[in-house]
Image (cartoon, rainbow, N blue to C red):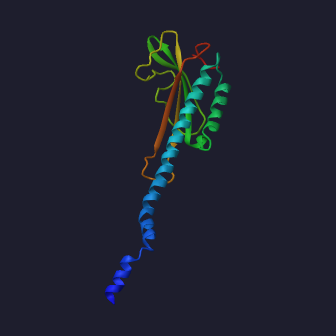
Amino acid sequence: MVMSLLARLRADRRGAALVEFAVSLPILTLLLLGGTEVARYVLLNQKLDRVVTSTSDLTSQSDDITTTELNNIFAATARIMLPYNYSRDGIVIVSSVGLVNGAPRIHWQRTGGGTLSRASRIGVQGGTATLPSGLTIAAGDNVIIAEAFYAFTPWLWRQMPAGDLYHRAITRPRLSNLTAIN
């Protein structure tokens, strides 16, 4: 009788799918959470790249940039970053860099688009600029450098590192040198 009971239990497969699902559920949950965070991370990087490209491009299109125009450009960054809260978690820094006595200097620098407190990796207004390797500026020329920071904090999967996302875009002014801001 015991042997026939054991034989019947061994042959019974009705709970096998439930057991397999219970074993695979933690793995599926981990994949879902990880995939969601990775997708969010990639999307934030793409949006941040769009912010610096747009900011640098729009600034360099002016022949005479004003503080009001820059503030309007900064206001657009929040729309580009939707649905993410860039006004709280981000900041854009725009700098005009040119040669002064043979050394790259920052003519002017403005921040906006958010309230995050970060310092420019290029330098400070009036100081020597730290340019990316390979970037050269001709005498009498200047470049517009836009930097964007975003304080990334994972939502679901805490294995991803929290920290700043950083992007930079460099353009040359099209119509005139933008060495002064009005």
Q: Quadrant of the N terminus?
A: bottom left
Residue 40: % across, % down: 52, 45
Indicate the position of residue 159 as horizontal and vertical percent values.
42, 51
Q: Is residue 156 above or below residue 108?
A: below
Give x and y (percent) for residue 100. 48, 13
Residue 60 in the image: above or below residue 18: above
Q: Residue at x 60, y 15 (%)?
A: 174
- The part of the image, by quadrant, that contains residue 144 is top right
Task: Pick whichever, 75 or 107, lies toward us.
Answer: 75
Give the residue displayed 62% in from the left and 36% down from the top: 80
Query: Which residue is rendered at x = 48% and y = 18% of the image?
Result: 105
| Residue furthest left as drawn | 3
Q: Left or right of 51: which side holds 120?
A: left
Tell which residue pokes out farthest to the bottom in this image: 1
Between residue 107 and residue 158, name the one nearer to us: 158
Q: Residue at x 49, y 26 (%)?
A: 124
| Left or right of residue 37, residue 88 in this image | right
Q: Quadrant of the C terminus?
A: top right
* Residue 155 x/y as whole percent: 51, 52
Above/below status of 42 relative to 2: above
Q: Nearer the viewer, residue 7 or 126?
A: 7
- Count up the numbered dots: 0
Q: Quadrant of residue 179?
A: top right
